[in-house]
Image: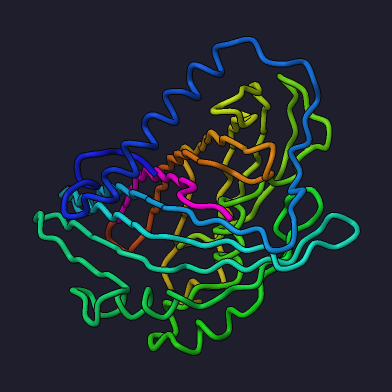
Amino acid sequence: MHRRSSRTRGDGRLGTIMQIALIVWAAAAVAWAQPASEEGVDLRPRWKTGQSCRYEIWAQRQRHTTVNMGGQSRQIDVLMETLGQVSWRVDEVRSDGSARCTMTLEWLKVTITGPDGQQQVNDSRQGQGDNEAIHQLIRAMAGVPIGVNVAPDGTIQAVSGTDAIRQRVQIKATAPEDLDFIETATDLAALPAAPADARAGQRWNARFKWTHEVGFLRHDVSYTLAGVETVEGVPIANVTSQSKLRLEVDRSQIPADAPPIDVKLLDGSASSQVMFDLIRHEAVGRNSTQQTTIETVVRLPNQTLQQRIEETIRSQALRIAEQ
């Protein structure tokens, strides 16, 4: 989660947390520039039953939309910022190294800034919000324990308990799918498809399929162990990733009588940096960026509507407590 100015406004504690994050990432940049140990390290989730931690999360989605039709053009800018805290608890570690965990979205705050500069603030800790649909959704998600099944290599296999959230959501069309929670868990405590004996410079790959407004966004991810350094006596693995994105359009959502519609991903990439605690085998912090440009062309009888959406999503997760 990223960018400073709007985050510190109205929440001094979060501002302090993100200042700490800046220091952590600066230290990581120095660590990556230094020679790394040649010893192999285990990047799998070698957890202990009862182990728990809490993360402060932040995400910012900037969307610039351009619509052209009939020789006229319109541009719309919307900014959405999400803050929150997520707890992670290891309930059971099995003999094969897999684990049963619980992830709980303790609280969420969503602020939307529209084209006119007006803000809508919605906080799950408050009884009311400025956008009823969003406020009701985040209140439905907050505080509900979600079971997470983690493979021995850190890959999130499945989630459970999500029906309780969907039952609380009043506007069913906004209800999140299991895949949404699997994505959230994937970007939290563990490193997916992690090797047991990684050395500096070693790479490994993983593939993901996440939900998107028009279908699914596929990520072909290449991870690299950039190096291992000791921070305040704790060995920390610095892992980077680069992703190639592919858009999979769900055409079943397009009415049969709709005019011809073409949807293309013109540009898409993602990258991340992860600091991984080699004693507790969990992430200390994450920093990610995703950029996409999607073009939609609708061919009407007498004219063509063209929409281009340029979107940048920045996100951060920082461990603020562990037990």
Rendered-image quadrant of the N terminus: top left
Residue shown at 34%/50% (left/top)? 61
Left or right for 161, reference 125: right
Up-down relation of residue 231 to residue 70 (above or below): above
Q: Which residues are magenta?
A: 304-323
Q: Nearer the viewer, residue 179 or 44?
A: 44
Left or right for 77, reference 245: left
Q: Is residue 320 magenta?
A: yes
Residue shown at 50%/89% (left/top)? 167
Up-down relation of residue 94 to residue 14 (above or below): below
Q: Where residue 142 appears, x then y in whole percent? A: 43, 74
Q: Where residue 36 appears, x then y in whole percent? A: 67, 15
Rendered-image quadrant of the C terminus: bottom right
Q: Is residue 247 magenta?
A: no
Residue shown at 79%/48% (left/top)? 153
Q: Nearer the viewer, residue 312 or 95?
A: 95
